[in-house]
């Protein structure tokens, strides 16, 4: 899964959304749907781990 995701990231690099400033983040163009496990009650995806991903959504 890691290799598939890294290949997808390399194929479709993108820029950050307007107003988003996170210098150590690698942005990807829309088109992936991910399933993540995260801390309960958190509004942000802090400490999230990717469980699975698939192609989909707007491209």
Image (spheres, rainbow, N blue to C red):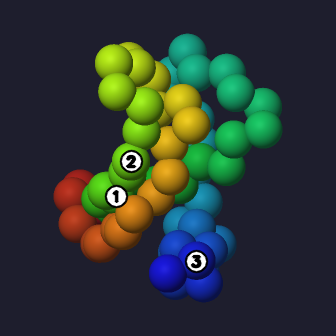
| Number of other residues with Cα within 10 Å of mark 3, as a class: few under 14, some 14 to 19, many 20 or more | few
Give the left or right position of residue 33, taking residue 3 as reference.
left
Where in the figure is residue 11, as x and y percent of width and height?
57, 75
Asked where in the image residue 33 lies, by quadrant, the reply is bottom left
Q: Residue at x 58, y 21 (%)?
A: 20
What is the CA distance from the residue labelled 3 to the residue labelled 1? 13 Å
User: Of discs 1 and 2, which sits in the foreground?
Assistant: 2
Q: Quadrant of the C terminus?
A: bottom left
Give the left or right position of residue 54, taking residue 49 as reference.
left
Vertical relation: 27 (above or below) 1: above
Local secondary structure at mark 2: strand
Question: To which residue does mark 2 refer?
Answer: 37
Local secondary structure at mark 1: strand
Can residue 28 be seen by looking at this rendering?
A: yes
Question: To which residue does mark 3 refer?
Answer: 2
Where in the figure is residue 55, as x and y percent of width and height?
29, 72
User: Of discs 3 and 2, which sits in the foreground?
Assistant: 2
Identify the mark at residue 34; answer none if there is no mark. 1
């Amino acid at each position: 899964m890691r290799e598939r995701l890294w290949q997808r990231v390399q194929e479709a690099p993108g820029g950050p959304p307007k107003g988003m400033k996170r210098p150590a983040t690698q942005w990807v163009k829309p088109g992936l749907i991910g399933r993540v496990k995260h801390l309960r009650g958190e509004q942000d995806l802090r400490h999230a781990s990717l469980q699975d991903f698939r192609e989909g959504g707007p491209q």
